[in-house]
Amino acid sequence: MNILFASPEVVPFAKTGGLADVAGSLPKELAREGQAVKVILPFYKSVKNLDLSLKPKKIGSFAFLTYEDSGIEYVFVVNDKYYDRDALYGDKTGDYPDNYLRFSYYAKSIVEFALHSGFKPDIIHLNDWQTGLVPIYLKMENSPIKTLFTIHNIAYQGLFKNSVLKDISVPRDFYHINGIEYYNKISFLKAGIIYSTAISTVSKKYSEEILTTEFGCGMDGILKTRAHDLYGILNGVDYKDWDPRNDKYIAEKYGPETIGGKVFCKKDLINASGLLEDTIERPLIGVISRLAEQKGIDLLAEAARDIVNAGASIIILGTGDEKYNKICADLADEFPGRVASLIKFDNALAHKIEAGSDFFAMPSRYEPCGLNQLYSLRYGTLPIVRATGGLDDTITDLYADPENGNGIKFQDATKDALIEAVKRGIALYQKRDTWHSTLRRIMGLDYSWQRSATFYRELYSKLINK
């Protein structure tokens, strides 16, 4: 198959979250399996800074730059007015006000490339609201190309005033309740849901959750009309990047049979973060997250005193809403040497936290898939998660199923439920023989992209032949 993979962020070129990891890994796995894959994204400042060897390509009024790696051609959409900025979607004041122009231009360029580059895609795999207008533009061109629209987080909907319809070149024929109209606004996400050949999400549980009022973020009614075209495919892990046996960022490489190497990684993490030296004797809970309400950061903050009093230490890495940035910074001030808060994104430190922590906490209110719980399994870092979305799909509670369990799971999004889960984890940590045998077992679990890519390949074939 010829697959055009469109994502507004792709590792290692541009990243704000898990979408970038997916878009960096899935196309590589598809290419390894013999598919012809091209990946298209904007030419951001972050891409410019990589100083890649790029080739120019002009198609109609659009300028592109191309780059080849691992059997994939990466296609960058050039428009400095729109993409030569310090961030991908916005700054501290909020989203860029012209995002409707920036990503309608991106969507138009995807269609232009698909129709006139010489590469004829059998399917275009679209990701999140930034690509949502592509099926409309294809329809306007009477193109038969099939589209799969993947929702990585339904809370991000690309909502804009309806007065921008003309600016984004979408006829008013598409502006109605069964089109892109959404409470007197327009929604790029809704466009993708309504007009794509099929829709997918990044876990089975999340595909079910978004059909409910609680998790659908107002889109549940629309999604129910397309429930027969909605699929849930779990994300995978690229173990070339996330495996302690070959991780270049950690102090000591280790595996299931050499798990003692984690101690050196923990010492290194303590030194890098300013935690007290005696943390080496305490259970250490790692958190790598966008700092936002969705991620349950407020629950973690409320539970911090009880967690520290129970004998554990906490290290937090991430950035997000100013409110939660401050909450996390204040925690480190309140519990010096017991809580470390690093308000930034640092890839090397993220690897050190995965390797050096004993537990990894994800108290999310909702989580479409989650990747860090999967990384943590490979690093022998026991996940503590709330039972939602992909976290529920991938983690089985050790107390419910000691033989097959791979983490600690709690149901309610409350401080008390999180504290109780942490205490169950600490009790297990103190049974050293059971603890180490459990870690060795979970390190052998396989969540590679190979299985997920097979599901995508089968779905692509189904849609192409529809």
Image (tube, rainbow, N blue to C red):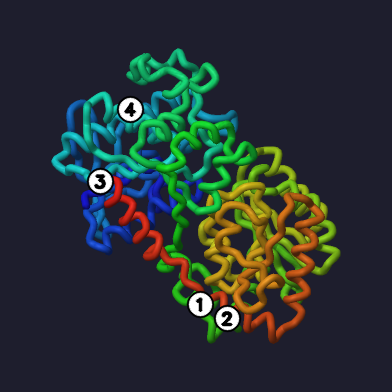
Residue 276 appears in the rendering: yes
Query: Residue 427, how many percent across, how many down?
Result: 78, 74
Q: Residue at point 38% right, 35% down?
A: 131
Task: Categorize mark 4 by other alpha carbons within 10 Å: few (<14), some (14-19), many (20+).
Answer: many
Query: Mark 4 sits on what residue?
Result: 136
Query: Mark 2 sits on what residue?
Result: 440
Among numbered discs 3 and 4, the one appearing first in the sequence = 4
Judge left or right: residue 416 versus residue 272.
right
Query: Is 442 situated above or below 336?
Result: below
Q: CA distance from mark 3 to mark 4?
A: 18 Å
Judge left or right: residue 363 versus residue 193.
right
Where residue 444 is drawn, which disc sits there?
Answer: 1
The amino acid type of the residue labelled 2 equals Arg
Mark 3 and mark 4 residues within 8 Å of each other at the beta carbon: no
The amino acid type of the residue labelled 3 equals Ile
Q: Residue at point 73% right, 70% down?
A: 425
Which image quarter is the C terminus in? Answer: top left
Query: Residue 146, how many percent across, how many down?
Result: 28, 40
Among numbered discs 3 and 1, the one appearing first in the sequence = 1
Camera-side mark, 1 or 4: 4
Query: Mark 3 sits on what residue?
Result: 464
Q: CA distance from mark 2 to mark 3?
A: 42 Å
Camera-side mark, 2 or 3: 3
Query: Residue 6, how many percent across, how many down?
Result: 34, 42
Mark 2 and mark 1 residues within 8 Å of each other at the beta carbon: yes
